[in-house]
Image: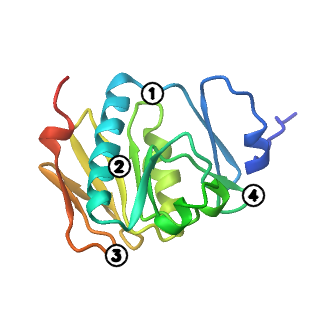
Amino acid sequence: MGMAVTYYTADLVRALPDDGRRYEVVHGELLVTPAPRHVHQRTVTRLVTALSRYLEAQPVGEALVSPADISWGQETLVQPDVFVVPLDQARTLDWRQMQTLLLAVEVLSPSTARADRFTKRRLYQERGVPAYWIVDPDRRCVEVWTPEAAFPVVEWDAVSWRPAGADEALTLRLEELFRAV
């Protein structure tokens, strides 16, 4: 006798207990991850700080961190580690209104690598997210994906981002991003 398989929806995920894990759903598949490692959180903090400073000078969006409920329908609810939404959507203060990601960033952890590199990467490409960064603190590199890319551009020295409407690009030196405490 086979096991019953649950097809998860965004509403089912929102109803799960608040137990310290991160719950997401992509095309009905439940993704569950434990609390992140210290290096993950340090990297997220550095990324959102750099993005926020950049966006003060280039006011095209707002940088945010998860937990968040980014959903494009009942079968999808994701929580990118760091993401940028246009200012008009950020000003609504409503996750349901934040439908356009200018940048999505996932910082790899051993428990998230598969979902970040495959499941979520494909979703962000399908949704036309112009830039998706997979930040790997262990290898000290950033994979840069675009909607049409079959393979990432892997950056080892610096990563740059210039959203539509910005006068200049943000360039992050990876040596600084991954420096020790």
Q: Using the rendered image of the protein, determine whether residue 93 is visible from the camera's viewpoint.
A: yes
Work out whether residue 52 or residue 124 is closer to the camera in this orientation and state it. 52
**Residue type pointed to by label 2:** Ile
* Disc 2 and disc 4 in contact, CB within 8 angstroms: no
The secondary structure type at the circle numbered 2 is strand
How far apart are labels 1 and 4 at the CA level?
A: 26 Å
Label 3 or label 2, whichever lies nearer to me, is 3
How far apart are labels 2 and 4 at the CA level? 25 Å
- CB of mark 3 within 8 Å of CB of mark 2? no
* Neighbour tally class for label 2: few under 14, some 14-19, many 20 plus, Cα within 10 Å: many
**Which residue is label 3 attached to?**
164
- SS state under label 3: loop
Give the total of numbered labels: 4
- Residue under label 2: 134
> Gap in Å between the C-alphas at discs 4 and 3?
29 Å
Rounded to the nearest angstrom, the CA distance separating label 1 from label 2 is 15 Å
**Which residue is labeled 1 in the image?**
36
